[in-house]
Amino acid sequence: MPLTAEHVLDRTRLRILDLAPGEDHTIEAGDHEWILLPLSGGCEADCLPAGAPEPVPFRLHGRPGVFRAVTDFAYLPRDSRTRIRSATGGRYALAGARCERVLPPRYGPAAGVPVELRGSGTCSRQVNNFAAADVFDCDRLIAVEVLTPGGNWSSYPPHKHDEEHPGEETALTEIYYYEIAPHGDHPGLGYQRVSPSPAGKTDLLAEVRTGDAVLIPDGWHGPSIAAPGHDMYYLNVMAGDGPDRAWLIRDHPGHAWIRQTWPDRPVDPRLPFYRAPATTGPAGAEPAAGRAGTEPATHRTVHPDRTVHPTRPEDADR
């Protein structure tokens, strides 16, 4: 049976699916929209929208691993039913958000993913904006990937999005899912900080490893700290109830000044880890280069039960 981990937070949901070669998994979308995102390996998916006579087939090329390449992906609408299968096996994220509108199933090519370098110096990181609000159309879901070189801080300065202030801030709950590069046979680690904000009481400092997730209902979040020698990857999954699908944030007033230093410092020369490919195959089809293999076993460890739930002061004894 496939190994799955599920993390649920208000409107936002994340499933991590680990398939052995030849295994398959079926997802009933329910009242959520989903994006199927390969983390390692390729897959095929047949998405049957509600009321449709035939499923929409997708063949995702995937990638060897999150530190190796941008990936293509598939959008699965609410009320659909999708069977996912992989001949070679791999690991897949299903990023979801409770939604109202029914959009058509769609293919997202790797070549269409904007790769952004953000920050500078030890605050440098790479952002793969595959489902950013202004990049890929969803009803509620916003999702991006962030890669941070070992020793750097990302999600910094600490910021929040837990209140609705038109044009300034949108209220979004968020899930972080991590993969940390090992050093040889030694697994990597990092740290995640979430601190109380005027609108929330979340207070958390967590050690994170490959397969961990942190749930962020509110609060200032950041930094995400990559231990020296261990590059950090995280997938951000966000959604909210507000009138606009937008990622509008407020920086922590005690740390926002750090942005003013960035123009005077170079971006970390270890970035980018990679760029999006220049071309891709036809929509829904696997590119001609062939299916990506799975990444080395040192990146295959998943801890499906390690969800780091925020600790509030009133729950500190639990």
Image: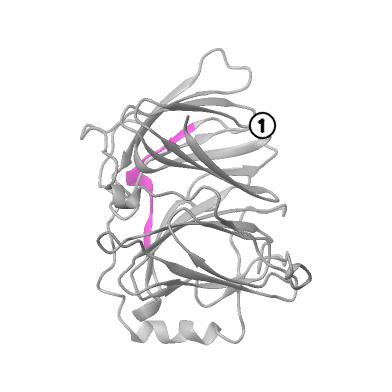
Image coords of residue 156 (percent x, y): 50, 75
User: Looking at the image, which residue is at 68% across and 48% down?
Assistant: 11
Question: Closer to the camera, 244 or 117?
Answer: 117
Q: Quadrant of the C terminus?
A: bottom right
| Range covered by the magenta-colored residues | 106-116
Image coords of residue 15 (percent x, y): 54, 43
Residue occupying the far top of the picture? 53
Location of residue 119 with respect to 318 vertically, above or below = below
Q: In this view, does 162 lie to the left or right of 46?
A: right
Residue occupying the far left of the picture? 289
User: Looking at the image, which residue is at 38% across and 73% down?
Assistant: 227
Image coords of residue 267 (percent x, y): 31, 76
Mark 1: which secondary structure? Answer: loop
Residue occupying the far right of the picture? 314
Which of the 4 image quarters holds residue 251? Answer: bottom right
User: Looking at the image, which residue is at 31% across and 61% down?
Assistant: 182
**Residue type at the position of mark 1:** Gly
Question: Closer to the camera, 89 or 48?
Answer: 89
Can residue 225 be found in the magenta stretch?
no
Question: Closer to the camera, 131 or 86?
Answer: 86
Location of residue 89 with respect to 232 vertically, above or below = above
Residue that badge 1 annotates: 30
Location of residue 27 with respect to 193 vertically, above or below = above
Q: Is residue 82 left or right of residue 122?
A: right
Q: In this view, does 88 lie to the left or right of 252?
A: left
Image coords of residue 8 (percent x, y): 64, 48
User: Looking at the image, which residue is at 64% across and 38% down?
Assistant: 32
